[in-house]
Each structure stands twice: as structure tokens, then as C-alpha cells.
Image (tube, rainbow, N blue to C red):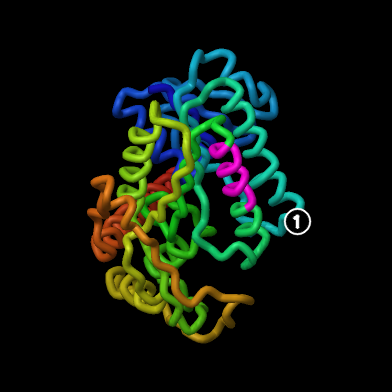
Amino acid sequence: MKVLITGATGFLGSQLVHALMTKGHHVVILKRSSSETRRIADMLHLVSSYDLDRDGLEAPFKENGKIDAVIHTATCYGRKGERASDLVEANLAFPVRLLEVSAAYGVDAFLNTDTSLPRFLNPYALSKSHFAEWGKFFAGSGRVRFVNIKLEQFYGPGDDDTKFTAHVMRSCSRNVPELKLTSGVQKRDFIFIDDVVQAYRLLLERAVGKSLSFGEYGLGSGEAVTIREFVETVHRLTNSSTTLRFGAVPFRPNEVMEARADIGPLLALGWSPKVSLIDGIKRSIEAESVNYERRTEKSDRSMS
């Protein structure tokens, strides 16, 4: 199968690149020339790579024959002070153009990475929900099969520091003096990256070659635990000396107090989460410890 992936240099996208390449698929990636490629450095020579700002949007479709599916994981969270118009461009205008080109070149399926956040929570959530509606419109007009994946709090080794889960794990692992948090009573659905990748693979296999339609799937563990429980579990498993200051940070406006994926449709397809929260945290902590030691050794050698 020939699959184009956006956001391939990010956490989720890079995991999908490795998983699909391992299974023998032809992977095409669409990135920017400035993208950091360390996560896929070992695979970069094996994929067909295109820079959006240099090659344009249509080049991957023109030069690779028929692309069977597009997996869209690229996104802008708005965590670096981006304007609302920046989020609209990244999360709506660009993917709509990509959807148009995909339909024009006969792509069978377009898998979109959506958020489970309420649409009016912030500009990020609003821009993502608007694109999902465009996907439904394209599917309804018979132009492409659109699979919308409403992803919960995914985590795992190699995640970005800007993510809450990774920030907590690295702070506790390194015994920072204190970690300021909300009261932590909010409940979240945490899912390990390996389970996420397996769900994408299943949905990809089920979507390509099928009749044109719209499908939507919640992707999480199906269980919700409090943020406090998650943080205290990380703190205990790292044997951390970090002081946890619950209640030091106020809730954000319109805070979501409970998020839990409805995984019934995925279960019906034969998928189920395999990695427990405890095991997922342990695996993430172990990987972070190894990476931290390597970085420290590299820094020591450069100073000697």
C-alpha cells in the first residue's frame, strides 16, 4: 500500500512511519524543509520525502503514482503564541487543500487526526472541528472516504516536552525541585502510543478500497483517571523527590472535567488497547532514563 503521511517528523507521525515501513508499505512524507528529522533519521533514506515549501503540495501525488491513503497527523496546538489565523491556516486551510488534492488524484482514504476537545474550548479545538466537518462534506459528496479519529491523551517514549505527560515524566525523573499543577481532579483518558499506532493500522486497512463514506472513531483506552492519579503514579514509579504542588495552578477557562473515548466502534473492528497505564508509564520512564544518560555522556565527552 502507498501511504502519504503529514506530520511524519512529529511524535505520532514518526511512529506511524516506522510501523508502516516495517510492514512493507511504501511511505511518502510531506514536511517542511526546516523540519527536524531526528525521529525518522533511520528511515529517511527509505521513504519518498517532499518539502511542502519547496516542492509544493501536488508533487508527491504526481511523482509516486496512485497514493492509496493519506494519514494526516500534522497540527498546530497554539502553544507558542500563534494567532488564531495561524491555527486556521495550519489546521483548516492547509488540510482542506490537501483533501482537495487527495480527491483529485483518486486517493481512496483520508485518515484525519482530530481532537476530542469541545470545539469552542480554544482556537485549536475549533479549527480541528471545522476541518472534520469539511471531511464529512467531501465524503458525503463521494469524493474520498474520510476517517476521523478523535484522539485522546496519547503518550510514550520520545514524546514532546510541550506535552503534559512528557513534562511530568521528565520533571519527576530529573527530580526538579517542584512541579506546579492544578488540583488534578480532572479526568483524562490516557493511551499508550503503541496502541494508537495499532488502531491507525487497522483503520487504514479497513478504509482503503471500501465504498466512499464518513467514519468517526474515538481513540483512547476507554478509561478515565484523574490527572492527580497520573502524576502521583509517575512520581512513585520514578521514586522522585520533586514536590508536587497540586492547586498551585488554576483551571484553564472552560476546563474539561472528564474526557473518555467511546471505543466501542474500534472494539467492534477487533482492536483493543493492550498496554496498561502502569506499564505504559514504566516503559516511557525507562526510555527517558536511557536517553537522558546518553545525552549526559555525549555532553561530558564534548567537554573533555
Quadrant holding the N terminus: top left
Does residue 267 appear in the picture of this structure?
A: yes
Number of numbered discs present? 1
Is residue 235 rendered to the left or right of residue 86? Answer: left
- Residue at (56, 13) in percent of width and height: 63
Up-down relation of residue 92 to residue 65 (above or below): below
- Residue at (64, 66) in percent of width and height: 120
Residue 294 is one of the magenta-drawn residues? no
- Residue at (50, 78) in percent of width and height: 181
Is residue 99 rendered to the left or right of residue 54? Answer: left
- Residue 114: x and y in percent read 52, 51
Report the front residue among 279 and 148.
148
Q: Which residues are magenta?
A: 130-140
Q: Amino acid at mark 1?
A: Arg
Report the front residue among 181 and 5.
5
- Residue 206: x and y in percent read 34, 35
Judging from the image, what secondary structure is the residue with disc 1 in? loop
- Residue at (43, 59) in percent of width and height: 152
Report the front residue among 52 and 70.
70
Report the front residue among 206 and 159.
206
Q: Residues within 10 Å of mark 1 (few under 14, many from 20)?
A: few
Q: Main secondary structure of the magenta part?
A: helix
Up-down relation of residue 299 to residue 152 (above or below): above
Is residue 287 rendered to the left or right of residue 106? Answer: left
- Residue 301: x and y in percent read 43, 44
- Residue 139: x and y in percent read 54, 37
Residue 269 occupies quadrant: top left
Residue 133 is one of the magenta-drawn residues? yes
Does residue 302 appear in the picture of this structure?
A: no
What residue would you read off at disc 1? 83
